[in-house]
Amino acid sequence: MPDLHVIPDPRKATWQVREGDDAEPRSEHATAGEAEVEARRRADSRDFERIVIHDRYARTRELIRRGRAWLQRGH
């Protein structure tokens, strides 16, 4: 299964949740925190194992599923 990504959209000043390389976002949010909450909810309901969170400076951090918990792994 592809990863979920939380990605900023600077043109709209929003944050998107995307599945893998999909061109269309699954959802769009006003803040990174709201987008991360939605990504976790979506990941839990569809058995995703990893969420990649992109910041506005091209850095990423990962959330990896371990049982029912999400553990952060930064880059």
Image (cartoon, rainbow, N blue to C red):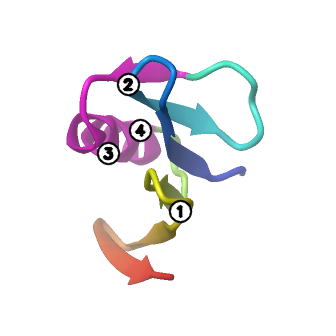
Q: Name the residue under label 2.
A: 13
Q: Distance between the residues labelled 4 and 1?
A: 13 Å
Label whose residue precedes the other's in the sequence (4 or 1):
4
Closer to the eye: label 3 or 2: 2
- Segment tinted magenta in the rendering: 26-45
Image: 20 above or below 24: below
Q: Distance between the residues labelled 4 and 2?
A: 27 Å
Q: Judge the density around disc 3: few (<14), some (14-19), many (≥20) Cα neighbours within 10 Å.
A: many
Q: Position of residue 46 (x, y in %)?
A: 51, 40
- Magenta: main secondary structure equals helix
Image: 46 above or below 57: above
In depth, the one of 43 and 36 nearer the eye is 36
Name the amino acid, label 3: Glu
Q: Judge the density around disc 2: few (<14), some (14-19), many (≥20) Cα neighbours within 10 Å.
A: few
Closer to the eye: label 3 or 4: 3
Label whose residue precedes the other's in the sequence (3 or 2):
2
Residue pictured at 30% horizontal, 66% vertical: 68
Left-right relation of 73 to 50: left
In depth, the one of 53 and 9 nearer the eye is 9
Left-right relation of 5 to 40: right
Q: Which mark is residue 50?
A: 1
Q: Which mark is residue 45?
A: 4
Q: Mark 3 points at which residue?
A: 36
Q: Position of residue 48 (x, y in %)?
A: 54, 52
Label whose residue precedes the other's in the sequence (2 or 1):
2
